[in-house]
Image (spheres, rainbow, N blue to C red):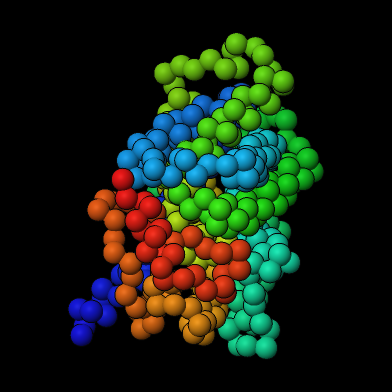
């Protein structure tokens, strides 16, 4: 009985475990991106090369597991793929990179933690997410979202005293401060507006994914096509802004490393994991883990770069983590009360082991692609036969 409960717990915890590497990839992306942007890397060239690498990384999985679904592409599906690429990559990342260049990495990371609230509001307005304030779980879900916003505000406004992690090298810290003070081109007002636009665009992407997965549940193929479309969008926009060969030239330097890292891990792997999590838990689930990126960035900067950690950052981070777990607890209880869901779907949605039931047969591969796609309303039942058909469709 204990072994069975442990197996159920592991199966039910997969959505949470899948989101942890997403935040680790994002942390590395924050550090690498800030460095190369300070050295004058052209934003749209970075995005075009990044998503070309991402498409190449996802292509083998799309070919082996979902090539039979290519004939299901239609003009409607292509429209939603175009919209997904524009909202989740071209607009969101473009605005974020320019906002990051105008501000600092820590300041820009704080805005990522507003995505859960914006996503929650948009999903509620479109009736993709339903939360009843009459229930305790619904109230705790809302409180969790509010705490996340409060944590962002505390981190951004209140600084407090600072300290260093481990051994502090004064010489390294002086160089870091001198570099920061000598950086030109800081535009906090413009950067804030750009980051807010990026936040809204990212939130829209999470909602668009629900519709896309309903029409075209081939996760790898959809991710690959999204990256290809985003690469084309970024290239065309970039050529309109800058046709200088030097802006598009690559060399054996940190820029190339950043492109390979961001394309393979921060885009390809991240999109697959996030798409999978959205199909299982809804559009609000993945962005609730964004506060972890702030923690990882703060620790990484403190250890690697010797940056000073402020008390206000720690306090705000604690509030955001509390909001994260409040939200997850509330969502877990809401899904537990969705008794009308069929067993196959309930097993994919449940987080706690006690409510997990049997799943469809696993794919004969290491794929993380789910076997059934969500409906526009997460509370709408999905037929068990549809889940079985989805499993069969993903086999070569």
Quadrant of res 238: top right
Question: Which residue is drawn at the image coordinates 33% and 67% (left, top)?
Answer: 360
Q: Nearer the viewer, residue 208 or 35?
A: 208
Image quarter of the N terminus = bottom left
Q: Residue at x 73, y 66 (%)?
A: 125
- Residue closest to the eye, 175 or 273: 273
Q: Quadrant of residue 67?
A: top left
Residue 350 rendering spot, x and y as whole percentages: 43, 75
User: Relative to 123, is 57 on the left or the right?
Assistant: left
Which residue occupies the foreground of this view, 232 or 5?
232
Q: Position of residue 377 (x, y in %)?
A: 61, 68
**Image position of 84 (left or right of 388):** right
Query: How many labels were placed on the picture?
Result: 0
What residue is rendered at 73% in x and 47% in y? 197
In the rendered view, tell whether residue 325 sits above or below residue 219.
Answer: below
Evaluate whether residue 156 shows in this view: yes
Q: Is residue 312 visible?
A: no
Residue at 60%, 11% (x, y): give it: 245
Relative placement, left or right, of 47 versus 387 is right
Residue 374 position in % (x across, y down): 52, 63
Where is residue 338? Give x, y as percent.
52, 82
Image quarter (top left, top right, bottom left or bottom right) of the C terminus: top left
- 376 or 1, which lies in front? 376
Q: Find the residue positioned furthest to the top.
A: 245
Q: Which of the 4 image quarters holds residue 177? A: top right
């Amino acid at each position: 009985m204990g072994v069975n409960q442990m197996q159920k717990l592991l199966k039910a915890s997969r959505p949470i475990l899948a989101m942890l590497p997403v935040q680790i990839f994002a942390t590395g992306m924050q550090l690498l991106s800030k460095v190369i942007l300070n050295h004058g890397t052209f934003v749209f060239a970075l995005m075009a090369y990044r998503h070309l690498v991402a498409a190449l990384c996802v292509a083998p999985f799309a070919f082996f597991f979902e090539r039979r679904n290519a004939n299901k592409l239609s003009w409607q599906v292509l429209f939603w793929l175009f919209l997904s690429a524009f909202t989740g990559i071209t607009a969101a990342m473009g605005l974020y990179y320019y906002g990051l260049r105008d501000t600092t990495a820590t300041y820009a990371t704080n805005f990522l933690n507003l995505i859960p609230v914006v996503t929650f509001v948009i999903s509620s307005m479109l009736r993709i997410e339903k939360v009843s304030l009459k229930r305790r779980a619904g109230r705790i879900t809302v409180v969790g979202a509010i705490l996340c916003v409060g944590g962002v505000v505390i981190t951004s406004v209140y600084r407090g005293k600072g300290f260093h992690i481990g051994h502090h090298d004064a010489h390294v810290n002086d160089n870091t401060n001198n570099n920061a003070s000598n950086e030109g081109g800081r535009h906090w007002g413009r950067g804030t507006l750009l980051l807010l636009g990026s936040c809204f665009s990212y939130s829209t992407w999470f909602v668009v994914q629900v519709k896309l997965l309903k029409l075209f549940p081939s996760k790898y193929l959809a991710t690959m096509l999204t990256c290809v479309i985003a690469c084309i969008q970024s290239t065309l926009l970039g050529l309109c802004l800058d046709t200088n060969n030097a802006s598009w030239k690559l060399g054996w330097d940190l820029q190339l490393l950043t492109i390979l890292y961001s394309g393979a891990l921060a885009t390809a792997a991240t999109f697959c994991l996030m798409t999978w999590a959205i199909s299982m838990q809804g559009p609000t689930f993945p962005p609730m883990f964004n506060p972890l990126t702030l923690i990882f960035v703060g620790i990484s900067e403190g250890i690697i770069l010797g940056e000073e950690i402020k008390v206000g950052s720690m306090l705000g981070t604690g509030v955001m983590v509390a909001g994260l777990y409040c939200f997850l607890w509330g969502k877990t209880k809401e899904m537990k009360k969705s008794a009308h869901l069929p067993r196959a779907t309930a097993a994919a949605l449940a987080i706690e082991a006690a409510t997990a039931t049997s799943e469809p047969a696993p794919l004969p591969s290491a794929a993380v692609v789910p076997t059934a796609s969500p409906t526009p309303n997460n509370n709408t039942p999905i037929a068990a036969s549809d889940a079985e058909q989805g499993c069969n469709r993903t086999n070569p």
